[in-house]
Amino acid sequence: MNLFEIPLQALLSQVVLGLVNGSFYAVLSLGLAVIFGLLNVINFAHAAMFMLGAVLAWMGLNYWGLSYWVMLLVAPLAVGLLGVLIERLLLRRLYQLDHLYGMLLTLGLTLLLEGALRSVYGVSGLSYEVPESLLGATDLGFMILPNYRAWVVLASLLMCFFTWFVIEKTRVGAYLRAGTENPKLVEAFGINVPLMITLTYAFGVALAAFAGVLAAPVMQVSPLMGQSLITVVFAVVVIGGMGSILGSILTGLALGVIEGLAKVIYPEASSTVVFLVMVLVLLMRPAGLFGKEK
Amino acid sequence: MTVPALEIKDLNAWYGESHVLHGVDLIVQPGEVVTLLGRNGAGRTTVLRAIMGLTGSRKGSIKVHGHETVGLPTHRIAHLGIGYCPEERGIFSTLSVEENLLLPPVLKTQVPGMSIDDIYAMFPNLAERRSSQGTRLSGGEQQMLAVARILRTGAQLLLLDEISEGLAPVVVQALARMITTLRAKGYTIVMVEQNFRFSAPLADRFYVLENGCVVERFGASQLSSKTEVLNELLGV
């Protein structure tokens, strides 16, 4: 296990591939963080929303002839709309109760959605072609990077930056940050906090669907595709600090890279390393890397 | 006859199961400064919270500039022209001083609020520290900020909860001058105060609450004749 025996090329290419996975972690944990910040709900439906994004992309192409690019816009909007319904009709009734109920409800929704789609599409996975304009690969010198994977990283980073910018630098974001601290007072200033909560949930799940469409050409589109990813994403949220925007973005990317490195250095640990990091971080900083102690 | 800025009739309010206000009646005319006195737990803060719709359930009538507010959600009550400054001040730690100041939206009343320059002229400390984190300010500065941010919105009825609490005498004097200035500008003010010496020279009228009921009401001119009653009711 000597680091110097590993060819630099393999190391670098795993870092880049790690960034691709990290991009998914970042966008997904960002959505979870935004939702948790304002709603105090741990959204277990996130896995299903991610999967819905991918399945919608597949359905768009195969049933209605809608291209990848159209679905990259339409799927998040549709899932966002579903988010509006979930928040208005279901989640809203649970805010007075313990957090556990929100978690149970969203977990139940996930099981329902996954079950329903599994009965239609099975579990074997549907294939989705890379859009034509992103076919091919680029030679980076140390590796050949498929253009589509480069696009995943780019699109995710842009989306993360956009979200960060809106929350940290705009007036709407100031409402959101203030609402996270003291929603009652923000409402007493005349801001429609219940509407803000609905839209925040919708935005959070739309982010998951966006990641789902991005994932469709690189993962097998299947009703259970969210399952394996979401466990890691929850670890990312915990490591970054519950509700921290920047924390979830940076931690998501970093953990993707760490996972990638583990694959060359000690492959047996590649699926465990994230949780090892989680244990270490929690031992030293119980509120997470970017979280504030309450 | 002018429409009262605030007219409360037979107000009952609850926090969950506990019944906190028992038939409170209160009237405030435009331009008046009214102080709610009473011991801790007498229900003064709850009256302000009930006006904003922040208690559990409430029954009775609360009219703001003639509009019934019982049954309205909190954010719509604010837009009738109310600026609320809570006891805990509610300065947001994730926002800078200026962001805190700009947070409350301009209300749907036609009245223009104070401009940001006017506010900085009135509170020069805040101008100096506009990019600091809101909660890094001293207690006095935070209190100034908590009041300043509701002056921008065009609110004409200010609900100020214990603004002099826990502050140094020199800051309390500055706050008293501020209330006098605001009053001269025509603001209607309802204050909850523990500090009787702070509020006595400022208010036009006083209400005394005990166990969620109004037990005394009198004007500033009757203040001297009420000293004994007040000593007994407030335990000062």
Image (cartoon, coloured by chain):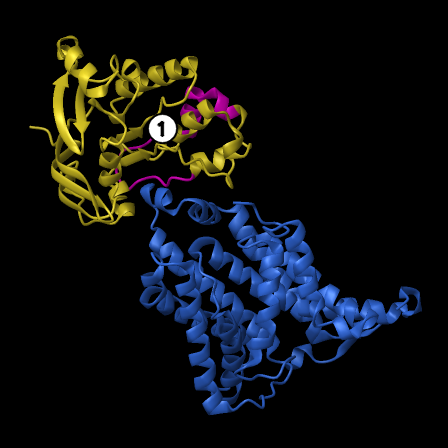
**Residue A75: image location, x then y, percent:** 49, 74
SS for dot 1: loop
Query: Chain coloured yellow: which letter?
Result: B
Chain letter of the residue carrying label 1: B
Q: Nearer the viewer, residue A131 or B81?
A: B81
The 10 Å Cα crowd at callout 1, few under 14, some 14 to 19, many 20 or more, is some
Asked where in the image residue A271 lies, by quadrant, the reply is bottom right
Q: Nearer the viewer, residue A264 or B2?
A: A264
Q: Can residue A140 be seen?
A: no
Query: Chain coloured blue: which letter?
Result: A
Return the residue found at the far top: B224
**Residue B200: image location, x then y, percent:** 24, 14
Quarter of the image where the C terminus of chain B is located: top left
Left-right relation of A209 to B203: right
The residue identified by callout 1 is B114
Return the residue found at the far right: A5
**Residue B207: image location, x then y, percent:** 17, 24
Residue span colored magenta? B103-127
Q: Is residue B111 magenta?
A: yes
Query: Measured along the vertical axis of the image, is residue A271 above or below residue B35?
Result: below
Q: Residue at x 51, y 82 (%)?
A: A55
Task: State how many labels appear.
Answer: 1
Quarter of the image where the N terminus of chain B is located: top left
